[in-house]
Amino acid sequence: QVQLVESGGGSVQSGGSLRLSCAASGRIFRINDMGWYRQAPGKQRELVADITISGRTSYQEFAKGRFTISRDNAKNTVYLQLNSLKPEDTAAYYCYVDAGLGHARRDYWGKGILVNVSS
């Protein structure tokens, strides 16, 4: 089993920044993709960004130019730098990892961390 612990959320004013972290622990044989989703009140969960094991990144349109995803493979940790935050970025942010090999490969999810952006 793999456990994910997120940190770094909180409340900021519009234009502010936060850095989210998500550390994976447990029986980890291999971590493939890592990423972040978010879910705003009353809305469906949506992908924010993801990063492959080789470091290739992809972002949703709303995240481009403001958010940066990175990972530290030695620490089994994925980060999400949130800059120029807007009130519409207010949501619970969830990290995930695609871990394992072959038939044992699956996604693991964190419990979520709140980001609140006030105007």
Image (cartoon, rainbow, N blue to C red):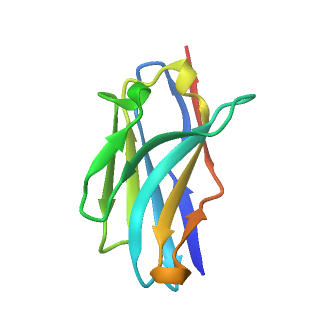
Residue nearest the viewer, comparing 39 with 103: 103
Considering every residue shown, the one lying at the far top of the view is 119
**Can you give x and y, in whole percent of width and height, for residue 115 in the image?**
57, 36
Q: Eyeballing the image, is 7 above or below 12?
A: below
Quarter the C terminus occupies:
top right
Q: Is residue 7 left or right of residue 66?
A: right
Q: In the image shown, does 56 or 73 lie closer to the viewer? A: 56
Q: Residue at x 38, y 23 (%)?
A: 84
Q: Is residue 4 above or below residue 88?
A: below
Q: Nearer the viewer, residue 118 or 109?
A: 109
Q: Quadrant of the N terminus?
A: bottom right
Number of marks present in the image shown:
0
* Residue, far right: 42
Seen at 25% across and 57% down, the residue is 55
Q: Is residue 47 left or right of residue 67?
A: right
Q: Is residue 66 above or below residue 19?
A: above
| Image location (x, y in percent) of residue 80 | 40, 46
Q: Residue furthest front?
A: 103
Q: Nearer the viewer, residue 62 or 73?
A: 62
Res 58 → quadrant: top left
Residue drawn 60% across the image and 59% down it: 110
Q: Position of residue 69 (x, y in %)?
A: 34, 47
Q: Position of residue 4 (x, y in %)?
A: 56, 66
